Amino acid sequence: MIDRSALSYLYSGVIMTPATKISVIISTYNWPQALEPVLRSIESQTDRNFEVIIADDGSKQETVDLINSYAERSSIPIKHYWQEDDGYRLAASRNGAVGLAEGDYLIFSDGDCCFMPDFISSHRKLAEKGWLVAGRRIYLKSGFTKKALEKGWRFFKWSRPVLFLLGITAQCNRPFQFIPLPQSEQKRKSKSQNWEQVQTCNLAVWKDDFYKVDGFDESYVGHGCEDSDFTLRLIRSGVRRITANHTSPVLHIYHSRSIPGRADTECLNPQRFQALLESDRHTAVLGISSHQGS
């Protein structure tokens, strides 16, 4: 007899069962005021079969204390990968965090992106072997962000209609992403070989596929292009793309583009990515294999 509880995890004939463990990788750097509501949103998830690994690019003690505090009392396993603060090394911190992952499926996000309660369950339903899932990001505006952080609002638990109203009143963008509009399989897979506009604040990939391309490329130092590099190499390796519109957007807390103390002096990432475009390479120049034995 077919287990009807498993049917909700069917997608194109491929099942990710409720027993499949997921590892959520959350990057952070010296902004505990934003990381705290992100950790709160983790506790609100309806799907509980996942772990969290904080990919910390060298935060100070205040962030470390916050993570330890949540790890001690959370019903969700929370691990902390910390590396020395030696410039913007997002790729390296994420690779280090994946090295601690026990799940078969990885979801990447950032320490300024909160999750609605069905975030994990939505990703689980879309997961399909040999495919990555590219989700969307909704930007909270500066005025709303300031009030939400000051008052401790748990906006990530608000209903979709209320969040939609935030959008149409200009408190955030992309309000229609809160509406669960039906998407056909053909529509979700219409960009199956397109690497463009995939963002690692909301990206899911099987761990086997992650290792197949040797993870993120740690030669990218400074802001930008490491997510495009990663996605392009996945596509070249044979992984295809599912677009997660209207299912599992993350709520991005407003901040300025610059990071204090981390202004790029001479960022060579665009040149690195251009070199990848001009090649047929699908593995990282300096990938997660560099962590082996460390």
Image (cartoon, grey):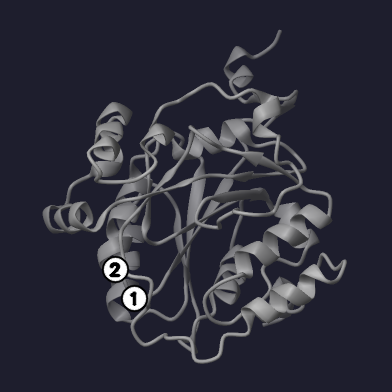
Identify which residue, 15 or 103, lies in the foreground: 15
Q: Secondary structure at mark 1?
A: loop
Residue 253, located in which quarter of the rendered image? bottom left
Q: Which residue in the protein does label 2 denote?
A: 32
Q: CA distance from mark 1 to mark 2?
A: 6 Å
Image quadrant occupied by the N terminus: top right
Q: Residue furthest left?
A: 151
Q: Position of residue 97 (x, y in %)?
A: 56, 67
**Which residue is at the front of the view, 199 or 31?**
199
Residue 267 is labelled as none
Residue at (69, 58) in percent of width and height:
231
Residue 54 lies, with reference to residue 109, above or below; the image says below
Residue 249, by quadrant, is: top left
Residue 38 position (above or below residue 132): below
Check disc 2 and report its element: helix, strand or loop. helix
* In the image, residue 224 above or below residue 41: below
Tell me residue 4's x, y (percent).
61, 12
Viewport quadrant of the C terminus: bottom right
Residue at mark 1? 30
Q: Is residue 285 visible?
A: yes
Q: Is residue 86 left or right of residue 14?
A: left
Residue 62 against residue 179 in the figure, above or below: below
Q: Amino acid at mark 1?
A: Asn
Picture quadrant where residue 101 is located: bottom right
The residue carrying pointer 2 sits among few (fewer than 14), some (14 to 19) or many (20 or more) residues within 10 Å by Cα, namely many
Task: Name, please, the residue furthest toward the top.
Answer: 1
Tell whether label 2 touches label 1 (CB within 8 Å). Answer: yes
Q: Residue at x 67, y 68 (%)?
A: 216
Amino acid residing under circle 2: Pro
Residue located at (27% from left, 53% from top): 141
Badge 1: how crowded within 10 Å, few (<14), some, or many (20+)? Answer: some
